[in-house]
Image (tube, rainbow, N blue to C red):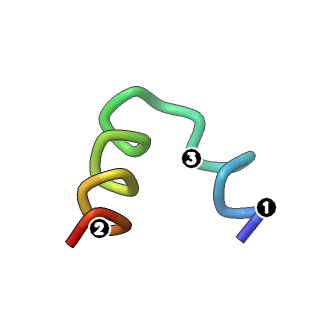
């Protein structure tokens, strides 16, 4: 998961990740 966060440091990607985590 750490790698994913590092690779996808884009705002859009982070927003998507946050939405996915909240769901």
Residue carrying label 2: 20
- Relative vertical location of residue 17 with respect to residue 6 in this rendering, above or below: below
x 29%, y 67%: residue: 20
* Residue at disc 3, secondary structure: loop
Other residues around mark 2 within 10 Å, as few (<14) / some (14–19) / many (≥20): few
Residue 23 is marked as none
Distance of label 2 from label 1 (alpha carbons): 15 Å
Residue 8 is marked as 3
Horizontal and vertical percent for residue 7? 68, 49
**In which quadrant is the N terminus drawn?**
bottom right
**In which quadrant is the C terminus drawn?**
bottom left
Q: Earlier in the sequence, mark 1 or mark 3?
A: 1
Horizontal and vertical percent for residue 19? 24, 56
x 47%, y 31%: residue: 10
Residue carrying label 1: 2
x 66%, y 51%: residue: 5
Horizontal and vertical percent for residue 4? 66, 62
């Amino acid at each position: 998961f750490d790698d994913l966060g590092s690779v996808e440091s884009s705002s859009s990607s982070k927003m998507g990740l946050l939405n996915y985590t909240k769901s």
